[in-house]
Image (cartoon, helix red, strand yellow):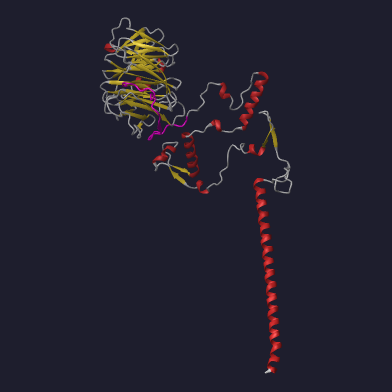
Amino acid sequence: MSLISQNAAPKFRESKDAADAEDSLLKRSKKRGRADDKHGRTSGMEQEEKEIKELESFLFGSLNSSIQFGKEIGSGNDEGPLNFFLDKSSGDDMVVYKEDINQYDKEERKPAWVDEEDEVMEVDIVSVRRLRKLRKEAGEKLISGAEYVSRLRAQHEKLNPRTDWAEFNRKRNEILASDDDSNDESGITTGDAEGDGVLRSNYELVEKSSVKLLPGLLEYSRLMNANSEEPSNGPINSVQFHRNGKLLFTAGLDRRLRFFQIDGKRNTLVQSIFLEDCPIRNASFLPNGSQVILAGRRKFFYVFDLVKAVVDKIGPLTGRDEKSLELFEVSPDSSTIAFAGNEGYILLISSKTKELIGTLKMNGTVRSLAFVEDGRQLISGGGDGDIYHWDLRSRRCIHKGVDEGCITTTSLSASPDGRLFAAGSSSGIVNIYKGDDFIGGKKKPLKSIENMTTTVNFLKFNHDAQILAICSNMKKDSLKLVHIPSFTVFSNWPPRTGLQYPRCMDFSPGGGFMAVGNAAGKVLLYKLNHYRNA
């Protein structure tokens, strides 16, 4: 037993020493691992701090180092000196970098992406109704994709014109600056720089549209009522634009003549004139814009002078016993006023002296008048259904013809160029004639418009004779617009909003505005988008 104990003791000591060695090795490895972890965490934190400092330096610049001109902050390579100059116009030295200016010198930007299929594909602009306005010719149907995009852009710019004052044009600014320098030195500027001559001439600032008006749909926009600041208390019998296109008068049975400044947004009331003894049934500017002629069912008429702001009462006329002078027409040269008198007489009044200078005699009663040939000739119609042509220099009737299908001629209107004239009748038929052919004996009209069913009370051509307005005050919304080149009626007129009972209308001199007076005392204002000028 002692032998066994002696043999087992060394083995026990050896196993114990091995266990102690293993424990010490394990402790040393744990300490080494903790040290490695500590060192790894320290290096990771240092790396993270370094990245944060680099990011701050990149975003906000170096806060500790001094700024060095000619070197980019955050990079060690030399990029060369920065381009700058001093702007001393305000008195303080301020650094302006050229990079900030050069970006405005680019007048046009190239598209970021171009679709090659635009050149190959074709677009049908007739099948979709809202695309028909992109046509340049009546028979046009298919266009290329690139042309389609170009026309869409042009249509957008026409409806939403660019604000010229916001355009940055360095060349123009340099020209204006050189002109200012020359003004400072000599007080006189010579030459006409590009774009600067517009201020030295009286030409219209907006170029008129040279594209022909297309039939079918009329592009228009409803604006604020022309007389919204002061509507009439009775039916509107006359509306007319001044020759400048910015002034409009309204007149009616409430015996007031009102002037409005038309801009389509506010339409400010300028002046209101009250006539105590004359409900106004007809009014008209003299074409030179100096006076307004006012008449009613009275033996006299009124003249309002716009320059002197004075109202003069004229009449009764010497040697005449007319009970009403409500129907009259003013010659385009502002020299003569033709009044419809009793028993078929036409009274010719001088616009300067306001005195009777001659008379013309028809077979029937006088119901309508219109001047042609710049005031050298007059056409008239009435109860006998005939149309008379008068030479005002000789005071003779040079031609008389029957208005086809007409019983009583109730209205006449001549185009501004005198080439065409239209005659409306009590049956609602409107015949359009060519003046030279009618005088030459060709009595067949170019076109008979039969869209009206009641008496035609008013006819009016626009400034370029592409639109003819036909009005009847006996039926609601009875106002038609005729496209003269094709002799067709615009299908989207009158609008759904309703005109009520229209009694008169007028186009602005440039064709951009159209005003319609109704029996409710309102003057509805519309913008014709085809025309760029008021």
* Position of residue 311 measured from the top left corner of the image (x, y, whole percent): 39, 11
Q: Is residue 78 depicted above or below 263 in this figure?
A: below
How many numbered marks appear? 0
Whether residue 16 sits left or right of residue 202 in the image: it is right
* Position of residue 261 measured from the top left corner of the image (x, y, whole percent): 43, 22
Whether residue 517 sits left or right of residue 4 in the image: it is left
Residue 395 shows in this picture: no
Report the magenta residues as a range: 209-235
- Which residue occupies 48% across, 39% down? 151
Looking at this view, is 508 or 173 the one in front?
173
Q: Is residue 90 depicted above or below 375 in this figure?
A: below
Snapshot quadrant of residue 437: top left
Q: Quadrant of the C terminus?
A: top left
- Which residue occupies 26% across, 11% down? 343
- Which residue occupies 37% across, 7% down? 355
Q: Is residue 217 magenta?
A: yes
Q: Main secondary structure of the magenta part?
A: loop
Snapshot quadrant of residue 269: top left
Looking at this view, is 156 or 355 the one in front?
156
* Position of residue 212 measured from the top left corner of the image (x, y, whole percent): 44, 31
Q: Is residue 454 magenta?
A: no
Residue 341 shows in this picture: yes
